[in-house]
């Protein structure tokens, strides 16, 4: 089976005093980053090798004191070998670009 890449984003609702702990957790998690933040929520991006890694990250964030909820917003998976493929728009798509 081909190695996969999973790319996901999720929104984290939290108390304002939890942001530092979330930032620390994300800094220690390979493939994770905070894309946007404010006092009560942040958007995390995570690129990893599988669903288990993604769920482990979400669980760790949810277990952080002060986190109210974690919601998956987007998830995409594809074979790692496909990442280098050049995507050509179809004729229909090309007319809209």
Image (cartoon, grey):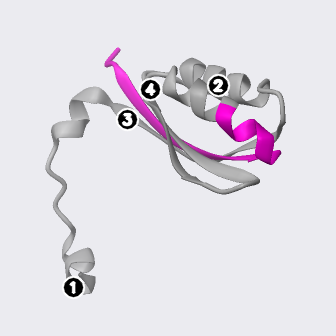
User: Could you tell me if the residues under marks 1 and 2 are in contact, i.e. CB atoms within 8 Å?
Assistant: no
Picture residue at 62% right of the left edge, 25% below the top: 57
Q: Is residue 56 left or right of residue 34?
A: right
Q: CA distance from mark 1 to mark 3?
A: 27 Å
Return the x and y of residue 81 as percentages of the image width and height.
22, 29
Q: Earlier in the sequence, mark 3 or mark 2?
A: 2
Report the mark closest to the observer, 4 or 3.
4
Q: CA distance from mark 2 to mark 4?
A: 10 Å
Q: Earlier in the sequence, mark 4 or mark 3?
A: 4
Disc 3, SS: strand
Q: CA distance from mark 3 to mark 2?
A: 17 Å
Q: Residues within 10 Å of mark 1 (few under 14, many from 20)?
A: few
Q: Which residue is mark 1?
A: 95
Q: Residues within 10 Å of mark 2 (few under 14, many from 20)?
A: few
Specify the quadrant of the image occupied by residue 52: top right
58 shown above or below 40: above
What are the residue bounds of the magenta stretch?
Answer: 1-20
Q: Which residue is mark 2?
A: 55
Picture residue at 66% right of the left edge, 35% below the top: 20
Report the mark closest to the observer, 1 or 2.
2
Q: Quadrant of the N terminus?
A: top left
Return the x and y of residue 94 as percentages of the image width and height.
20, 78
Q: Which residue is mark 3?
A: 78
Q: Is residue 62 left or right of residue 82?
A: right
Q: Earlier in the sequence, mark 1 or mark 3?
A: 3
Q: Which residue is mark 4?
A: 48
């Amino acid at each position: 089976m081909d190695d996969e890449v999973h790319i996901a984003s999720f929104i984290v609702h939290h108390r304002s005093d939890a942001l530092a702990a979330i930032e620390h957790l994300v800094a220690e998690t390979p493939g994770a980053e905070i894309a946007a933040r404010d006092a009560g929520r942040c958007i995390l991006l995570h690129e990893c090798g599988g669903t288990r890694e993604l769920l482990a990250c979400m669980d760790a964030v949810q277990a952080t004191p002060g986190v109210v909820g974690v919601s998956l917003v987007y998830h995409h998976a594809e074979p790692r070998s496909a990442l280098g493929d050049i995507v050509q728009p179809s004729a229909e798509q090309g007319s809209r670009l």
